[in-house]
Amino acid sequence: MGSKNKLKRFKENETFKNVIQPGREEIANGSFALKGNWAEHFGNDNPIVLELGCGKGEYTVGLAKQAPDKNFIGIDIKGARFWRGAKTALAENLENVAFLRVQIELIDELFGESEVSGIWITFPDPQIKYKRTKHRMTNKNFLDKYRRILHPEGVVNLKTDSEFMHGYTLGLLHGLDLEVIYANHDVYKNAGSPKEVLDIQTFYENQYLEQGKPITYIQFKVN
């Protein structure tokens, strides 16, 4: 994507009512007004579901269409990517969609205790090298952050093409004695996966499927 196109998208994001872009100072000093008050943004008390590393926002938008009784927030630092999802949501009058431009490791500074009912992690970078362990989105530090913002009955969903990420996460969950509700190492070949896992496909997922890669899925609890 050219720099001019990126700048154009950044400018458009500033005009979108469904895009929130807090500054680091606002987050650091605890003055982010929506923390614990996301119901005010959506105008209702419906459950809130996050997509972390939302990319183009396909899953955020797709889930919002399937579940109009829930609110969905796509989170990514790359605003030029989720511009597509934000624009689509506005064009289709999806009032239960928002996008938040922020680094994912700050999410516990942006949501109140038990404010979130579900989390989706879709095709994250598996960060295979050992020195990158701290960046894996299902490592213990991230799980602790999810625990702080998730409702006690909330769940985390991991969908990935990485067998390494799938195995690493399962091993960690078992080691921490956390509940694995469902796990499948090839969702399109093995029956039983939830509808939202099969019916929504991201841009990258389509590429992986064309390459013949199996798509894995885990649903688990952190509380």
Image: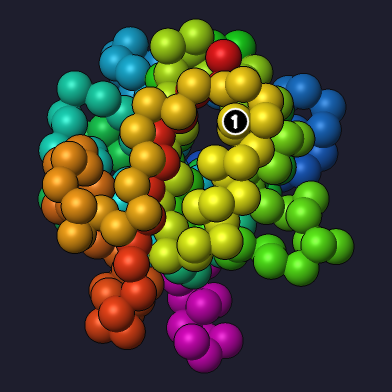
Q: Is residue 218 above or below residue 110?
A: below
Q: Is residue 46 above or below residue 99?
A: above
Coordinates of residue 27 in the picture (x, y in percent): 74, 33
Q: Is residue 98 visible?
A: no
Q: Nearer the viewer, residue 74 or 139?
A: 139
Q: Is residue 97 above or below residue 116?
A: below
Left or right relative to 197: residue 75: right
**Residue type (three-letter) at the residue carrying disc 1:** His
**Magenta residues?**
1-12
Coordinates of residue 101 in the picture (x, y in percent): 56, 50
Left or right relative to 198: residue 75: right
Q: Nearer the viewer, residue 210 or 45?
A: 210
Q: Is residue 96 above or below residue 37?
A: below
Left or right relative to 28: residue 177: left
Circle 1 SS class: helix
- Mark 1 Cα shell of 10 Å, populated few (<14), some (14-19), many (≥20): few
| Quarter where residue 133 is shown | bottom right
| x 27%, y 75%: residue | 209
Coordinates of residue 159 in the picture (x, y in percent): 40, 51
| x 55%, y 52%: residue | 167
| x 52%, y 90%: residue | 2
Q: Residue furthest bottom?
A: 2
Q: Is residue 209 visible?
A: yes
| Quarter where residue 173 is shown | top right
Q: Looking at the magenta stretch, what is its main secondary structure? A: helix
| x 43%, y 18%: residue | 154
Query: Residue 13: within the magenta?
Result: no
Residue bearing the label numbered 1: 174
Q: Nearer the viewer, residue 132 or 148?
A: 132
Report the label total.
1
| Quadrant showing the C terminus | top right
Query: Residue 11: within the magenta?
Result: yes
